[in-house]
Amino acid sequence: MSRLILNRRRLLGLGAASAGSLVLAGCDQFDFLGQRDHPVRDFLERANQLTYSAQRALVGQQALAREFSQSEIRQGQRPNGSTDPRNIELYRDLEASGFAAYKLRIIGLVETPKEYSLTELRNMPARTQITRHDCVEGWSCIAKWTGVPLSRLLDEAKVQPSAKFAVYHCYDQMGGGLSAPEAYYTSSDLIDAFHPQTIAAFGLNDGALPVANGAPVRIRIERALGYKQPKYVHTIELVDSFAKFGLGQGGYWEDHGYDWYGGI
């Protein structure tokens, strides 16, 4: 089992990193990754769905990611991707005030939309877990994360039966240059959203979550690759479809050719 999952991680890392790099580099022959109805992209999407279905069948819905001991933390959590969204005025103002006015909103297909201040989140019963962050680029890092189980927040909002996915909206933006910046987002199914190790993390290695690692709140989905661990999260939206977001693939990187599930 572990060998199968490891081989999937390597394959996904090579494929997604290569395709994503080519798209971002502007290689014309890979323009299909940004086209909704291109037959090659459609084929890749069907392959991703097959992989998702197979791994869901092989790995139990409540199977836990491996947790580590304190002694196995050898370094600080490596920042990567977007690491400083203070060019966004709203985020800059929040950070300057110590995130005093920050709110995490739960909206969409819920009975009772919710919002929580950072203080309220910190005062809730928390979960601490030492887990390994696996990046699609091929590196990994063990760190201690502390936060509120996301299932608690979703239970308080009372997710409607029609909801199928949780979409995580973030303050940071990606792109630029020849294209306009795009607000970063990603998503998960409700199995991962309600998983006992999925937390709205506000702490890292016994301290407050740093800006470079996603302050004030980062969603940790421990059975997924790093690009599925969104930073700077301000809104969690419960939906039944991705049609109204980006290119409809469930995330910024997913819209640019990465696997939607990203499971390990």
Image: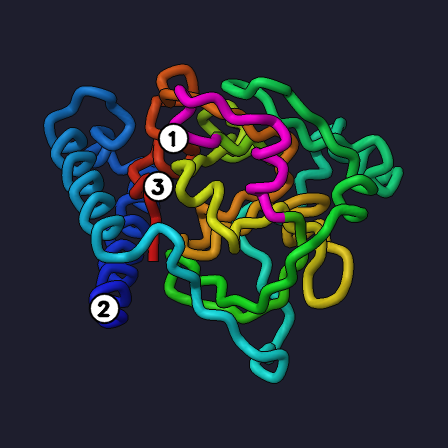
Splitting the image into 4 quarters, where does residue 6 fall? Answer: bottom left
Mark 2 or mark 3, whichever is nearer to me? 2
Circle 3: residue type: Ala
**Which one is in front, 155 or 229?**
155
Question: Disc 1 and disc 2: Cα gap in Å?
Answer: 27 Å
Labels 2 and 3 touching (C-beta < 8 A):
no
Q: Which mark is residue 1?
A: 2
- Kindly identify the residue that appears in the image at 16 percent across and 24 percent down: 38
Tag 1 and tag 2, C-beta contact below 8 Å: no
Residue 160 falls inside the magenta stretch:
yes
Q: Quadrant of residue 46?
A: top left
Query: Residue 25, labelled with which disc?
Result: 3
User: In the drawing, does residue 228 fall left or right of residue 88?
Assistant: left
Does residue 55 appear to the left or right of 130 in the view shown? Answer: left
Q: Residue at x 69, y 32 (%)?
A: 104
Q: Residue 250: which numbered mark, if any?
A: 1
Residue 26 numbered mark, or none: none
Bin the neighbour count of mark 2 within 10 Å (Cα to Cα): few under 14, some 14-19, many 20 and up.
few
Label 2 is placed on what type of residue? Met
Residue 151, horizontal then vertical, whole percent:
56, 42
Q: Which residues are magenta?
A: 149-166
* Label 1 to label 3: alpha-carbon separation: 22 Å
Q: Nearer the viewer, residue 176 or 76?
A: 76
- First in residue order: circle 1 vs circle 2: 2
x and y percent of residue 258 in the render? 32, 42
Disc nearest the viewer among 1 and 2: 2
